[in-house]
Amino acid sequence: MIAALLNPATLELIVAGIQAAITATPKVYAVAAAAVEWIQSLFAAGVITSETQDKLLAWVDNAVHAHVIGETPPAWTVEPDPVTPTPNQ
Amino acid sequence: MKALYALALAASFLFTGCVKDRLQPGGAYAPTVVTTSTYTVTNTDGMVVTNSLSVTNATALPDYPFFIVDSTFKVTYTALDAVFTFERENRALLWQLSPSIKHSLDAIRPQANDIVKDFGIARASYKANPTPAGLNTMNTIIAKLKQLQASAAALVPTTINAK
């Protein structure tokens, strides 16, 4: 089963599935599309280029650094609940 | 939405065993160093000729496991960030559906933040001193992040019907 999962043809199906799921959520597309592009780049030409490696290292460095120094992204912080309008009595 | 995260989670498992011998030398996970030697030769005419010879050597073995760890982290983090961002950008509408969506994700957010911090610390330690134990630590932390990702994805509705 693992060998089937490693098959490039299988991967193409999975990537196509991800893309199909993305079309249903346009707000999330920009974020998830980056993940899809990343997955595709790993299997292009069969070699992980030095540029791709450098980009990955820098990306992870920046992502964890922000959390470690306390600069948590707004989406990861607990914010106040929305204010619900009080119905007129 | 749930299908998207399920596929992203499945893709995160595909990286295991897929990148053997595929790291181009000179990249961040397969560093190399170029050593240039300069030497002079006096030819038969008595002229002194200066030549240089550059040799590229790997400074260390390519670190495939570390590359896989970082790749998996990126996919997992991106998927989890997408859930948090989706909820935040659609908060008013999701709040009408059920306040428990935000409250449940709010319970996950601090945990996810702490796990990413732990990963950052473990990763810095590994970069300073690469060891198999360090890799295991990072993989253990990522497994926790994946669990939170799955939990968070399950909280977000697959369809939203505006009232």
Image: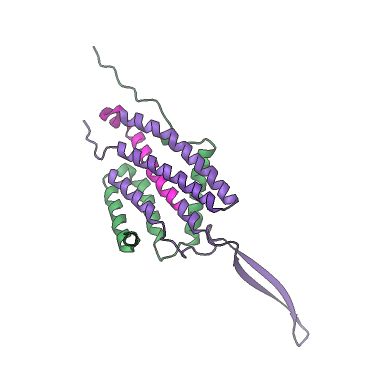
Chain colours: A green, B purple
* Residue B125 visible in rendering: yes
Q: Is residue B50 magenta?
A: no
Farthest residue to the right: give it. Answer: B46
Q: Hey, which quadrant is residue B142 in on the image?
A: top left
Which residue is at a point 44% across and 52% down the rendered structure image?
B71
Q: Main secondary structure of the magenta part?
A: helix
- Circle count: 0
Q: Position of residue B125 (x, y in %)?
A: 57, 47
Q: Position of residue A86 (x, y in %)?
A: 28, 17
Farthest residue to the top: give it. Answer: A89
* Left or right: residue B99 compared with residue B61: left
* Residue B77 visible in rendering: no
Residue B59 versus residue B1 in the image, above or below: below
Which residue is at a point 35% across and 31% down the rendered structure image?
B104
Using the image as rendered, state which of residue A38 and residue B48 is in the foreground: A38
Q: Hey, which quadrant is residue B105 in on the image?
A: top left
Which residue is at a point 38% across and 53% down the rendered structure image?
B13
Q: Is residue B82 magenta?
A: yes
* Left or right: residue B121 compared with residue A35: right
Residue A64 versus residue B96 in the image, above or below: below
Q: The N terminus of chain B appears in which quarter of the rendering?
A: top left
Q: The C terminus of chain B appears in which quarter of the rendering?
A: top left
* Left or right: residue B4 compared with residue A61: left
Farthest residue to the bottom: give it. Answer: B44
Q: Which residues are magenta?
A: B70-99
Using the image as rendered, state which of residue A47 and residue B147 is in the foreground: B147
